[in-house]
Image: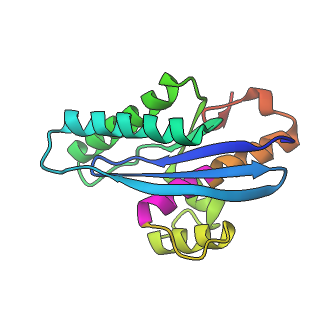
Amino acid sequence: MTDTLRVLGIDPGSLKTGFGVIDVHRSRNAYVASGVIRLPSERPLPERLKIIFDSMLEVIDEYRPHEIAVEQVFMSKSAGSALKLGQARGAAIVAGTFRDIPIAEYEAKKVKQSVVGSGAADKQQMQQMTKTLLKLSDVPQEDAADALAVALCHINSRRHFSQLGDVRQYRRGRVV
């Protein structure tokens, strides 16, 4: 990684979708931006999915990431919640593919392991560790911290595969 690489991390949700943007130059990570897209709960799901799609296109167009990392769906409290989460995730992924940006996917446990060192880390640990790793003055919002953690996981995975000489075979959060 000799040039600067910009990674957009996404923590999808049907009510809140977090995003985080990190620049990587050689072995240095630099925070660029993060935020949370808040979705109106009174709106039907299809309208919220459109808001996610449109908002992610705005984020992509503003920050111009080279790669996108998205958290994979994990089992939720109910099957209905898991389906909504999957659809929100799909809207974010389609926005990235609409702009022809490579997408990597990571399990929540892998993100936590990569950033905190424990696959069972809680939200506060994730927030503190993203603050520390990115040298932020404040703890990021919960969903924004999760999105930054997804981006950090992608960067760590990419570095690992680069050191192994396998970058050309690296896609979608796994070696193929």
Q: Quadrant of the N terminus?
A: top right
Write the start and end of the magenta stretch as one range: 142-151
Q: Residue at x 49, y 47 (%)?
A: 10
**Is 20 on the left-hand or right-hand side of 5?**
left
The figure's colour scheme reads: rainbow
Residue toward you, 25 or 80: 25
Q: Residue at x 74, y 50 (%)?
A: 24
Q: Residue at x 14, y 43 (%)?
A: 43
Q: Position of residue 23 (x, y in %)?
A: 69, 50
| Residue farthest front in this picture | 62
Q: Position of residue 94 (x, y in %)?
A: 43, 27
Q: Position of residue 148 (x, y in %)?
A: 56, 56
**Is 170 on the left-hand or right-hand side of 67?**
right
When the figure is inspected, residue 24 is found, relative to residue 68, above or below; the finding is below
Residue toward you, 79 or 106: 106
Whether residue 127 is in magenta: the answer is: no
The picture quadrant where one finds residue 44 is top left
When the figure is inspected, residue 141 is found, relative to residue 13, above or below; the finding is below
Q: Could you tell me what secondary structure mostly forms the magenta stretch?
A: helix
Q: Position of residue 4 (x, y in %)?
A: 77, 44
